[in-house]
Amino acid sequence: MVIALKLNDNGRFLSFSTRLFLSVVALFVISAVLFVAYQFQREKEFKVELLNGQLQQYNERIYERLEGVPRYSWGVVTEEYLSRHLDHGLRVTLILHSGEVIYDNGEARREMGNHLTRTEVNQALTKGSGYDIRRTSETTGKPYFYSATNYEELIIRSALPYDVNLIRTLAADSHYLWFSVGITLMLMIIFYRFTSKLGKAIHRLREFAQQADKNDPIDQEMQLTFPHNELGEISQHIIQIYRRLVDTKEALYIEREKLIIHLRTAREGLGVFTSEKKEILVNDLFTQYFNLISDRNLEQAEEIFEVSELRQITSFINKWTQRQPTHEEKRTAVTINKDGRSFIVECVIFQDLSFEIWVNDVTQEEEQSRMKRQLTQNIAHELKTPVSSIQGYLETIVSNPNLSRERLDSFLERCYAQSNRLSRLLRDISTLTRMDEAAHMIEMERVDISLLVANIINEVALDLEEKQMTVVNALKPKIQLRGNYSLIYSIFRNLMDNAIAYAGNKVRVTIHCFREDDRFYYFSFADNGVGVSPEHLNRLFERFYRVDKGRSRKLGGTGLGLAIVKNAVVIHGGSISAKTASGGGLEFLFTLSKGMDENGMSGFEE
């Protein structure tokens, strides 16, 4: 039932119970008035019929006196009868069927004309009897109640003056009227009490509906204020059902949040979609992996259905989502090899034709295991090279005291260069160790990525000019997140230094944030330089891994720059991968979490 509020003439709101009470009372009063009016009219007609019957009896007795009497004596006989038997005031008229009046005991009898047009006379001729209420006599000028009876030779009409006494006689009895009014008032009081209880229950139920619509808590007091009737019991049951639904909703919400957190932090890339291929939930690894599989960066998760490598998955989805829902779950899986990496992609279609796609990098665990095995060996090897060089130069100096000053300075300069390289190597190892073992102790602050990248481009301007390189900074202004400034600086600075060192001359570097959602920024750092062979892409972020070992050492690299980049990205809640750019060269794809501010809100607001 929809309960609305209406405005009365004064602009005030009327409650449902008031409108119900007024509506029913109005109908009841109208019915009572009509009934009283009908009864009043019926009683009046009954009294008129009773009076007419009495006058008809008078007419009958007069006719009995006139039977067998000659016509010329009718007036005398009637006069004599009236004088002995009837009260004063009764008027009797003897009328022939022709309408001629032969006797009338009233005044001005000689002036009376033909009476065929009189109502009661006309009715008597046609029906045998008739009456007329309160007609003014044309001869006397006074109002009378007339009653006429038709006999074989004449019409006898009797009449009573329509005075105060007659009016009282014909008036309806008012006792039943007051009785009806009393019954009506009593029923109105009873119905008012009933509607007030009903209105109270509906008012409380409306308050409950308004609170429920606003998701406000329902207090125990509201349940106790309902009246003790059927509607109150129904309302209490509704509140109890609502409370159970709220508790269930809260429990489901908590479980939903747990599930979402689990899916976002899962080691597999996971995407959940509707039957129309609309995104419901996509985690970071899902986007990251499919950007590696695709030949272009995907701005929307729905774009994966256009990736050629997923043609088999897309066909499977189209086949089953165009059918009617079933109670079975359908699933399929494919293996995709791309740029030296292997991915398993599995699709599951649920009963309501929504589906999920998860993708897993099956080479990751093997790579991590191999990296751990080689880490100790690589560190020893990398430290051995500068130490051996320094030791060799110093032994030469010590064993040859007669070296020329020029030769001695040359050996010392080489020792100094190797010591600098050793210092940088130890510093990078220390940075990686600090990130591995105490990442949670790194201080976070508000960082403007757009401004940071612009500063780095200014710092390396001379190196870019020397190698005739250009940088296309496509970052929009004020890309801000909560993070550690030094680590984020090391991400973009190491990528820039890597491009300057290895991409080649006359190269264009493009930095772009191609996507943003509630939790992450998605970055692309690409160049169109010499690039890297596919077999090396999977190992670029390994510590001490070099594509060209001789060239890297010649340029002074430690082999830890990209490892530092990866760890810094991971500390900031993201992931990073490398692939061959669509126009040639090397492209790094990585995400950075927006982080949480002091108020627990994602990102920053201006």
Image: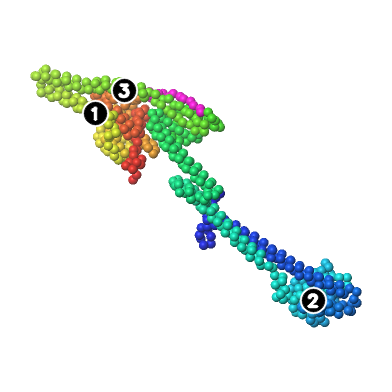
Q: Nearer the viewer, residue 28 or 516?
A: 28
Labelled pair 2, 3 in contact (Cβ < 8 Å) = no
What's under tag 1, amino acid-wise? Answer: Ser
Tell me: residue 540, above or below residue 35.
above
Tell me: residue 97, above or below residue 452.
below
Q: Position of residue 138 (x, y in %)?
A: 77, 78
Residue 29 visible here? no
What label does residue 430 carry, if any?
1
The residues colored magenta run 329-342
- Looking at this view, name the residue that lies furthest to the front: 84
Tell me: residue 117, above or below residue 509.
below
Q: Nearer the viewer, residue 569 or 155?
A: 155
Residue under the point 69% across and 65% down:
40
Tell me: residue 195, above or below residue 546.
below
Residue under the point 83% across and 77% down:
81
Q: To which quarter of the image does residue 453 belong?
A: top left
Q: Quadrant of the C terminus?
A: top left
Q: Does label 2 or label 3 sit earlier along the sequence?
A: 2
Chief secondary structure of the magenta portion? strand
